[in-house]
Image (spheres, rainbow, N blue to C red):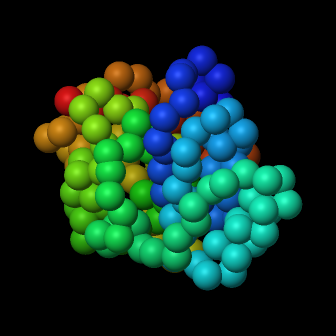
C-alpha cells in the first residue's frame, strides 16, 4: 500500500472488498472509501470491523458488474482478486463500470491470477485479456508479474485517460 502513503487522499473504491481490510487501510490514510462485495456476510463483517476502528467506510452489497448505485468519479480504484474470478461475459460489464466511475487521470490497481488449472477448468485472466479489456479508456503504466504460493499472478497499474 505504498501508493496510498505517498498519494494525497481522495475518493477511493475497493472492488470485491471482502471483509474490508484494504478499504479500512485506505480510510486510515484519509481516503473517503466505498467498498463493494456481492457477499452480504462479508459486508456485514466489513462494516463491523470499520465501526470498531472508527473508520467511516461506506460498504455496499452489490455485484461489480452492476454498479449503477454508485456515482463517481473516484480518484483511485483497487481490485485485489475480483476481476480474475468473473466469467468472461461479466468482465466487459466490469470494465464499462470501471471507466464510468474513474475520473480522468485517476488510478486503477489490479491484482489478478494469471491463467492456471483450477477445479477442472482454468482460473485467472491473461495479461493480454486485461489489456484488451481496459485499453479503450485506461493506459497501462506498469505490470509486475510474479508468483504467490507458487501460482502465477500480476499487479497492474493503470491510469484513466
Residue 130: % across, % down = 32, 45
Q: Residue furthest top?
A: 6
Above or below: residue 8 compared with residue 67? above
Q: Quadrant of residue 9?
A: top right
Above or below: residue 27 compared with residue 105? below
Q: Quadrant of the N terminus?
A: top right
Q: Residue furthest right?
A: 52
Q: Residue furthest left?
A: 136
Residue for point 60% across, 28% down: 4
Q: Quadrant of the C terminus?
A: top left
**40 left or right of 99 in image:** right
Residue 85: % across, % down = 47, 65
Residue for point 83% across, 53% down: 53
Res. 10 visible in picture: yes
Residue 73: % across, % down = 32, 45
Along the line of sight, the residue nearer the viewer: 141 or 106: 106
Amino acid at each position: 500500500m505504498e501508493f496510498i502513503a505517498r498519494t494525497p487522499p481522495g475518493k477511493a473504491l475497493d472492488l470485491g472488498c471482502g471483509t474490508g481490510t484494504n478499504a479500512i487501510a485506505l480510510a486510515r490514510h484519509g481516503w473517503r472509501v466505498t467498498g463493494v462485495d456481492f457477499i452480504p456476510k462479508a459486508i456485514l463483517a466489513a462494516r463491523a470491523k470499520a465501526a470498531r476502528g472508527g473508520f467511516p467506510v461506506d460498504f455496499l452489497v452489490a455485484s461489480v458488474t452492476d454498479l449503477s448505485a454508485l456515482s463517481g468519479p473516484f480518484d483511485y480504484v483497487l481490485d485485489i482478486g475480483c476481476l480474475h474470478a468473473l466469467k468472461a461475459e461479466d468482465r466487459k460489464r466490469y470494465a464499462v463500470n470501471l471507466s464510468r466511475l474513474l475520473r480522468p487521470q485517476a488510478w486503477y490497481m489490479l491484482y489478478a491470477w494469471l491463467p492456471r488449472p483450477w477445479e477442472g477448468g482454468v482460473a485467472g485472466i491473461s495479461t493480454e485479456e486485461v489489456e484488451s479489456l481496459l485499453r479503450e479508456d485506461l493506459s497501462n503504466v506498469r505490470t509486475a508479474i510474479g508468483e504467490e504460493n507458487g501460482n502465477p499472478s500480476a499487479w497492474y497499474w493503470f491510469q484513466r485517460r
